[in-house]
Image (cartoon, helix red, strand yellow):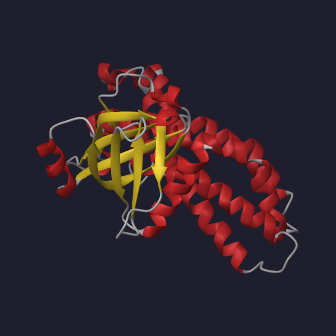
């Protein structure tokens, strides 16, 4: 596919079919797919072949290469830009001609989805292998490999949400690693401010999407987009953030197992946060506690 489409974008004989707006956009359309291909072809496949006789030990192979699997995160982060470009030019003569030459039944976008599907399939494969490897030698490695792949999938998912934040003035990368993100009901109770505002705030929750970084927690408002594919992905308009250095947490709020409190500057600002389930609350409370300690 790379030869059939990407290389053809540089082929002088095909240049007349490429519209000017599409020229020099190869990196946006294909992201780092070539890097993913070379990793599998030159490194991962060869490593896997060493385990043909010992499939139960294949978890070790995954663990040895785990750092390289980060390349999928880069690919997924670029995917919205790639999709947007594809939608603009999907019916261009250039792509139709490439598809005809390759004799492909499916158009290019089906192949651009493959890396996203691949990283998801790995966790299913490892789960399946674990099912049949309960008491064998490599079971621990398989479990660890599965946990690591699930960690990469979580990072990919979190980063897809993070790149959809709009209206934040600073550089998100300076806030440290993104640890968690999710949607909550939020009530505010601030010492400052009009008592009427405080009364209103107690009853009516705001819907907020929280992004917990190592150095700050961001409060955003989620906006659902209309459209297809990645166009349907939500965007998040930034509202405000709290520096983790001045944050405190109250783990239990009377009368609701799903609520906890984040407070700021010695309770000058208090945010009562209601998670969708007690389990989600517990995960967030643990993660915030880790940051604070």
Asked if 222 appears above or below 78 in the picture, the reply is below
- Can residue 1 be seen? no
Q: Quadrant of residue 98?
A: top left
How many numbered dots are placed on residues in this image?
Answer: 0
Residue in the foreground of this view, choosing between 158 and 216: 216
Say whether residue 184 is left or right of residue 122: left
Measuring from the top left, give residue 21's x and y in whole percent: 30, 21
Q: Residue at x 19, y 46 (%)?
A: 198
Residue in the foreground of this view, choosing between 228 and 254: 254
**Residue positioned most to the left:** 196
Measuring from the top left, give residue 176's x and y in whole percent: 55, 32
Q: Residue at x 52, y 30 (%)?
A: 7
Measuring from the top left, give residue 233's x and y in whole percent: 31, 48
Measuring from the top left, give residue 254's x and y in whole percent: 37, 66
Residue in the foreground of this view, choosing between 81 and 278: 278
For the C terminus, the quadrant is: top right
Q: Residue at x 31, y 37 (%)?
A: 84
Asked if 96 appears above or below 172 in the picture, the reply is below
- Can residue 271 be seen? yes
Residue in the foreground of this view, choosing between 23 and 233: 233
């Amino acid at each position: 596919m790379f030869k059939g489409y990407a290389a053809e974008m540089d082929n002088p004989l095909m240049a007349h079919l490429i519209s000017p707006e599409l020229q020099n956009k190869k990196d946006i359309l294909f992201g780092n797919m070539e890097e993913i291909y070379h990793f599998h072809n030159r490194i991962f496949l060869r490593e896997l072949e060493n385990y043909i006789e010992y499939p139960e030990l294949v978890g070790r192979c995954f663990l040895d290469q785990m750092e390289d699997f980060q390349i999928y995160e880069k690919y997924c982060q670029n995917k919205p830009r790639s999709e947007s470009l594809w939608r603009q030019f999907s019916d261009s003569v250039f792509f139709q001609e490439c598809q005809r030459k390759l004799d492909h039944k499916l158009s290019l976008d089906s192949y651009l989805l493959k890396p996203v599907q691949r990283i998801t399939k790995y966790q299913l494969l490892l789960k399946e292998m674990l099912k049949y490897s309960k008491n064998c030698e490599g079971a621990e490695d398989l479990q660890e490999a599965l946990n690591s792949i699930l960690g990469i999938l979580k990072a990919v998912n979190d980063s897809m949400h993070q790149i959809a934040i709009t209206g934040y003035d600073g550089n998100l990368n300076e806030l440290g690693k993104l640890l968690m993100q999710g949607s909550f009901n939020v009530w505010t109770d601030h010492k400052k401010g009009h008592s009427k505002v405080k009364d209103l705030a107690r009853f009516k929750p705001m819907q907020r999407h929280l992004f917990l970084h190592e150095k700050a927690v961001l409060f955003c408002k989620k906006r659902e987009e209309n459209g297809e594919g990645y166009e349907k992905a939500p965007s998040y308009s930034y509202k405000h953030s709290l520096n983790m250095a001045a944050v405190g947490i109250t783990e239990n709020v009377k009368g609701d197992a799903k609520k906890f409190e984040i407070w700021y500057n010695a309770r000058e600002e208090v945010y009562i946060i209601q998670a969708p389930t007690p389990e989600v609350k517990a995960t967030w409370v643990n993660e915030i506690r880790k940051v604070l300690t």
